[in-house]
Image: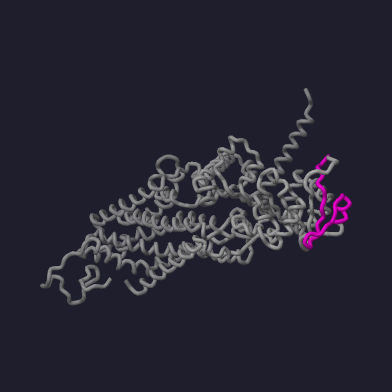
Amino acid sequence: MSDTAPDPIVPASPGHVPWAAGPARQAPSFLSAAMRVFDLSLGQMLWSRRTIFLGLIVGSPLALGVLFRVLEALGITGGVRIEGAQVSGPTVFGGMIWLLYLRFIVPVLGVFYGTALIADEVDDKTITYLFVRPIPHGAVLAGKYLAYLVTTVFVVLPSVVLLYLLVVPLGNGSLASSFPALLKDLALLGIGLAAYGAVFAFIGAYFKYPLVTGLVFAFGWEQLALLLPGYLRRLTIAYYLQALVPHSMPQEGLGGALQALFREVPPVWVSLAWLAGYVIVFIALAARTVERKEYVLEQ
Amino acid sequence: MTAKTRYFLIGSVMVLIVGLSIGLVAFYGGMPAGLFSGQNGPEELKYLPGDSAVVAYANVRDVMNSELRQRLRKFEGVTDEGRSEFKTRTGIDIEQDIDHVVASMGTPGPDAERSGLVVVTGRFDTSKIEAMAVEHGGKAEQYKGTRLLVMAHRAEGESAEGGPEMAMGFLGKGVVALGTADMVRRAVDRGAGGDNVPANAEMMRLVGGMSGESMWAVGRFDAISAQASLPAEVSERIPPISWFSASGRVNGGLQAVVKAEAKDEQAAENLRDIVRGFVALAKMQAGGKPGMQKMMPDVQLSGEGREVAISFAVTNEMLDAFEAARAMGEKFKKLDQDAPKQ
């Protein structure tokens, strides 16, 4: 990403006077500005303290997968067992995608990274440096959102692939027959990260306490609405994501049974359209909020 | 973008590419089945015909020694009648002599009865068994170096001989085959290789998932649905199923899994919906009755793609609850009998 054009984001070299005589400088386009912010934010995001959290959260399913393989190799368990009954590798993998990735990891990453896109800059009082640049404020959000997407996708998807290689062969499960489901899972997780990220980017840009609001949305509203009969569930992301999951839903207690009983599955194209809608609408809303809102930096 | 970030992204993409390539190669059939997992299943499967409709296995020693069996005996559900009859006919004591059993059933049809084969592994006193067989009218013969005891089939209550000859073949040290003479001879042939269960990739795919189970059965669903003689109204409503498997592990209680492989994903989803409905209904029914909850196994529905799996466990607590309910029922019955008649 190096070129000879003056960088509108990176501070100019000492002695450089922007208003000094010279050729007139044009403000970069929205896309170009977003890409500059993306380039800057990607490194910051990847090598921040939050990455340790990301590594832990994504590493735990892998550790579990390694443990299953070791136990099977040692012949201690006679296979992976749920409620004492042996289950095959593909079923374990499906369950982990459902319960660990879709229900936990994706929303958690969305909350922690998405809400921090703007909120971190406000907290660190560095947002001024971005906003004084001759770029649209919305481009800052778009660039940071892209950086979030690349960071999470490039960490989560390889971990899912490794988990597939570790867990699916358990109990003589077939890598071949689970391969189409893996492709669907990867696409689904990408879509999930994009949708949750967009919603939480808006929450981060709009609300004063975005982390709390985000956690309430992800683990309060989403869980509750899915249990209730009626139309409320259509106002969640999980409802549309669940419709795309190639694995059957594991049932957990009465909550799972209720969810199963009231379960209605929207067609795939409807789910995809709604999720795309969520991404577009919430990114647009977040960009609009960033454009219009006056962030007051507390001294 | 810093070099560190670039290396991270390249590493990440490499992991994705390598993982997906392995999956892709496996998907197009280029991956050896045992590369990421071991081959399972008892060795005696080699004696069973490759075109078997159902193959079953039982670790008799585990089952006989299990606490579950001891407790079931209290419910008068397990009697020694069958065991005694088997001992009288073959000279083999199921509880003492047998370690494990594999069995197969042929395709449903008029000859299905003749296509069954049982291979038993354990410790057998061959001379005693042979003497007993001869005493019951059997004769000993050699077939390709294997000793067979052949007996004319005699239906119960009939004096005249009828049906195919039955045989017992000593296939190896501690390995005995039981079935029609024709099936036992073919089992001897298959021992050297050929059209046996391990050569049936589809069957072995199902058998592979059964490692560590005390008992299991896998096979084509049409084989059991034909045996079950379900009413047309029921069978017409069951989504099309191609394969099934059932397995159980006795360890204190019983942990069981029943799996069905539907013809396609839509049929599997329909089947899941049916099962899900029943499971949810049962859970809600039992929700307000603590007594019922104790006796209800926790049923889990799982499976993906064309597979539907139901797992449940019969725990010691459930057996306690059954025992208590039975004792209470008997008490009420006794009180009812002792009550003064009006």
Q: How many numbered tags mark residues here? A: 0
- Compared to residue B87, the image places residue A26 above or below, namely below
Tell me, yes or no, whether the highlighted magenta stretch contains residue B138.
yes
Residue furthest to the left? A21
Q: Residue at x 42, y 69 (%)?
A: B14
Horizontal and vertical percent position of residue B159:
86, 41
Question: Relative to the observer, which residue lies in front, B89 or A156?
Answer: B89
Q: Do we see residue A56 in this rendering? A: no
- Compared to residue B339, the image places residue A48 above or below, namely below
Horizontal and vertical percent position of residue B113:
72, 46
Figure coloring: one colour
Span colored in magenta: B129-157
Q: Quadrant of the C terminus of chain B?
A: top right
Residue furthest to the top? B342
Residue furthest to the front? B144
Q: In the shown orientation, is residue A116 left or right of residue B197?
A: left
Tell me, yes or no, whether the highlighted magenta stretch contains residue A154.
no
Horizontal and vertical percent position of residue A34:
26, 62
Q: Residue at x 64, y 63 (%)?
A: A76
Q: Residue at x 41, y 45 (%)?
A: A267
What is the quadrant of residue B192 in the picture?
Answer: bottom right
What is the quadrant of residue A196 in the picture?
Answer: bottom left
Residue furthest to the bottom? A15
Q: In the shown orientation, is residue B135 left or right of residue B274?
A: right
Question: Relative to the observer, which residue lies in front, A140 or A187?
Answer: A187
Q: Do we see residue B181 in this rendering? A: yes
Q: Quadrant of the N terminus of chain B?
A: bottom left
Question: Relative to the observer, which residue lies in front, B272 or B339?
Answer: B272
Horizontal and vertical percent position of residue B50:
65, 55
Q: Residue at x 35, y 62 (%)?
A: A148
